[in-house]
Amino acid sequence: MCLAIPAKVIAIDGYLAEVECFGNTRKVGLTLKPETKIGDYVMVHAGFVIEIVDEKYAMESQELWKEMIKHEQHED
Amino acid sequence: MSSMKTNVYRDPVLGKELIQAIKKQAKIFQEKNGRKVNLMEVCGTHTVSVSKAGLRDVFRDDIELISGPGCPVCVTSHEDIDYMIELAKQPEVIICTFGDMMRVPGSHSSLAEEKANGHDIRVLYSPLEALDIAEEQPDKKVIFLAVGFETTTPAIAATIDMAEKREIDNYYVFTVHKICPPVVELLFNDPKLKIDGLLLPGHVSAIVGRKALDFIATEFKVPSSIAGFEPLDVLAGMYDIIRMLNQGEAKVTNQYLRVVTEEGNKAALDMIAKYFEAASSNWRGIGSIEGSGLVLKPEYQKYDARNLYDITIPESSNTRGCRCGEVLSGHIKPTDCGHFGRSCTPVSPVGPCMVSYEGTCATYFKYERKV
């Protein structure tokens, strides 16, 4: 039930947005994240956008994890 | 196709390196403490991620991965399922629900059986659709079965908000919402469980924010990490926890920075606070826990399906000896239950943990059985 997959916002009409995920589109509510913009990647849960995916952090995580491993290997 | 690429979080080379780093830390723990480290994944979706990626097996000599009570369908009590079934039998009612609830066995029946008996029960992807049904059929009472943790509650609150704005007066919710902190506290205080660290649910955390979970570190001195649901997300969270254990540190780290913020989702939290208040709630196999549920505030009682009919449920029972309760609280593994894989399978489930997509028993059945 807590599964949520990033979807891209392709249109906004008032409190509803159309999002696309793996080629499927569906209407979702924006009440919980009213600042959502067209082009954002969002997490959708139970029919509502619950968060906008931070692309900067999405890119950085991998680098952080590589750093973590480097640090670990250094201690050998 | 414009979906965000998630395969970067499944990178096999980086994955292997992370596994080695975790194993090294787990070994240090084992040498220090004379036992394996016990980590609990609270969220059912983590349970699925861990098993699907084969991590339980990869770490079988290093880490005891215990599945926690994080599947909302599974923790819904017998009594509440029975009540839902009685509601479905009332005249002029349309029951709307997420699909997972359909086959959960009540004491005498299930929603799927009642649908087969001719009652109007519909599976929806979103409670928003229930509002449309209510608007289109004003002569019916449309009841949404509101099951779920902090992630789902704001969505339900938002539908009530919309029902108010759209002046829809035949939309109701049957709330069995639960919140995570009280049950986490209960597990820590259980002398039979020795939980060293917690892998915290990514999407509940997206709503409540990282800071709201700091109490786990400050009050219980248990290191924890918020993780996403891809294999590398999970591994990064596990690494954080074991490293903190070895260093004698206890913090709540955030390994899901792309989605989880320090403060959480303010609009969602405001929406919960506007419509809901804390109440005691009954957890399957665990019992009633004070302050662990969310119910509609007195001023919004007109949306509460419990007020619609004078329903007395037949005596609820768990006569078939389902041990889902013990599985949910981490006391036994699904394979310790006599029903598992024999009289209880996803096709013919005895209990909810075998029904739900993220139920621990269903996950073990799909990914952890050895031929």
Image (tube, rainbow, N blue to C red):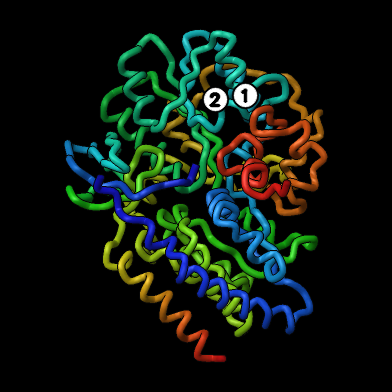
Rendered view: B347 above or below B188: above
- The tag earlier along the polypeptide, 1 or 2, is 1
Which mark is on residue B83?
Answer: 1
Task: Count how many numbered circles sit on residues in the image.
Answer: 2
At label 2, the amino acid type is Arg
x and y percentages locating residue B124 in the rendered image? 42, 27
Query: Dot 1 falls on which chain?
Result: B
Q: Is residue B2 visible?
A: yes
Rendered view: B43 above or below B86: below
Disc 1 from disc 2: Cα separation: 9 Å
At 41% from the left and 56% from the top, the residue drawn is: B206
Disc 1 residue crowd, few under 14, some 14–19, many 20+, Cα 10 Å: some
Looking at the picture, tell me which residue is in the foreground, A32 or B64. B64
At 27% from the left and 41% from the top, the residue drawn is: A20
Query: Dot 2 falls on which chain?
Result: B
Looking at the picture, tell me which residue is in the foreground, A3 or B342. B342
Disc 2 residue crowd, few under 14, some 14–19, many 20+, Cα 10 Å: some
Q: Are marks 1 and 2 on the same chain?
A: yes
x and y percentages locating residue B254 in the rendered image? 45, 68
Residue underneath mark 2: B306
At label 1, the amino acid type is Tyr
x and y percentages locating residue B168 in the rendered image? 32, 22
At 39% from the left and 51% from the top, the residue drawn is: B269
A22 vs A71, left or right, is left
B62 vs B249, left or right, is right
B263 vs A71, left or right, is left
Badge 1 element: helix
Rendered view: B213 above or below B149: below
